[in-house]
Amino acid sequence: MKTFNDIYNSIKPNFVPQPRSIIDLGIILSKTYQVLKSEKYIEYSPFDINDHPSVSDRTTIERLIKELSEIKTLDKSFYMVSSEGIERAISSIKTLEINTLNPNTDSNDSKRYDFIFLKERLLSLIDVCREGLNFTKKKIILDNLEKLNSKNKKINYLNTTLLSIKQNENLWDKIQFKSITDFLELELKKWELHKNDQNETKFKSTYELHNYIVKLIKEKLIHNIRYQEGYRVFWRDERSLVEPKKETEIQPFIKSILKPYCDSENIKIHRESTIANGLIDMTFTYLSFSVCLEIKKAQHQDILSAINSQLSEYMIGDETDYGIYMILWYKSKNGYDLPKKYHSVEELTNKIKIESDTLKYEIISVDCTKPISPSLK
C-alpha cells in the first residue's frame, strides 16, 4: 500500500508536475491533517470556530480522508491531477512533519507561520480532493447507468440513488451533497424526457462518445492489426521489418476499420480537418460532441511533447475536453531499430507527462510489428 513517504520520494527535480491520483491526494490530505494535530501546534486550532462548517471542520476532513482511501470506479480508472503547487506542498509538508519531532525548538512566530502555511495547504487540498471525489462519483453513476439496458431501469436507479443520498444528508459534506444531487436531478430530467424509439440518442455526453471510440480502437483496430495481418498496411517493405509508412499513409486504413462501427452509431469521422491553424489527423463527431485523435510514430522527434503542444491545441480549437493520442510502435528485435532511446512502448508512454489539469486524454499504443507465428513461440 502506498504511503506518504512513497509519494514524497517520487518528487521530481524542480518540482516538475506529475500525475497524482485521487488516492494519492487522500494520502497527502491525511498527512497534512496529522501534522496540524501534532503537539507542536497544540496552542493553535486548525478548526477555528468562525470557519464555515463545510470547509474545515474535523468531521468533514476525516470523512473525506476515509472516502479517498476507499474510492474506486468500475473500470479501475482514477481522477488524476498534475500541479507544481501540489509537488511543492508535498515537500513542505514532509519538512514540517520532521520539525514536529522537536516541537519546542522554534519560536512562537515561527510556529504560527508554519501553522498558517499548513492550514492554507489543508484548505487547498480539501478543494482539490472534493473536486476529485465529485468527478469520480459522477463517473461511477455514469458507469452504472451504462450497464442498464432500459429507460425505466435507469430512472429507477437514479431515483433510488438520489433518495438514499437525501435520506443521509447529515452524513455528507455539504458541497459534495449539492454537487451530486444536482447532477442526479439533471440526469433524471434527461432520462424522463428520453424517448424509447429507434431514433434515441446513443451517446449522452462527450465522455460516452470518447469511451466508445477508445473501445473501438482497442477491440477492433488493434485486433485486426495483430490477428488479421493488418500490420502489413503499416510497412512499405514486404517483410514488414525495414521501412514504416508515414502516418498520413495509414490513416485511410485506420478509418476503414473504424468506419463501419461508427456508421452504425451515426458517428462521423473527419480526416485532416483544419483546427487551430493545423490539421488534426481524425475527429469523431456525434451531434454536438467531438473527440480528437492524433497519430504519432514512436520514433517521431516530438513524441513526448505533441500531446501537450499539438493535440491539446486541436482539442481547444474543436471545443472538446476529450482526445486520443495514438502511438505507433515499429521497433522489434532483428528488425526496425527506432526509437533508439526506448526498449518498449511501455517505457516510452511512461515518459509522457500531461500538462493540462482539465483536458482528458487516452494514450493508446499500437504494436505495428510483425507478430511471431504461434508455431514459433
Image: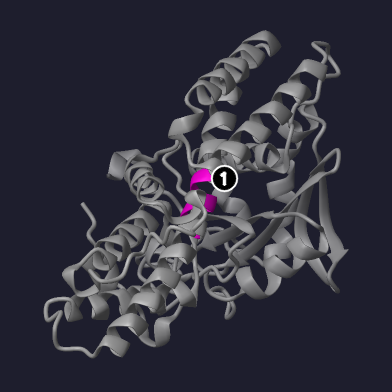
Using the image as rendered, state which of residue 202 and residue 254 is in the foreground.
Answer: 202
Q: Is residue 331 left or right of residue 177?
A: left
Residue 34 visible in the shown view: yes
- Report the quarter where the C terminus lies: top left
How far from the left and from the top, in percent, is residue 8?
Answer: 27, 72
Magenta stretch containing residue 131, yes or no?
A: yes
Using the image as rendered, state which of residue 238 and residue 353 is in the foreground.
Answer: 353
| Image position of 201 with respect to 101: above or below | above
**Residue 324 placement: quadrant:** bottom right
**Residue 296 placement: quadrant:** bottom right
How far from the left and from the top, in percent, is residue 51?
Answer: 49, 58
Residue 228 visible in the shown view: no
Amino acid type at circle 1 is Ile
What predominant SS class does the magenta segment belong to? helix
How far from the left and from the top, in percent, is residue 129?
Answer: 46, 54
Q: Is residue 228 left or right of residue 267?
A: left
Residue at left offset 70%, top offset 39%: 209
How far from the left and from the top, in percent, is residue 261?
Answer: 71, 31
Magenta stretch containing residue 14, yes or no?
A: no
Residue at left offset 29%, top offset 45%: 376
| Image position of 53 with respect to 151: above or below | below
- Give the SS element for disc 1: helix
> How would you rate the neighbour count of disc 1 (Cα within 10 Å): few for under 14, some for 14-19, many for 20 or more?
some
**Residue 153 placement: quadrant:** top right
- Residue behind mark 1: 175
Residue at left offset 48%, top offset 49%: 53
Using the image as rendered, state which of residue 350 and residue 7 is in the foreground.
Answer: 7
Q: Which residues are magenta?
A: 128-134
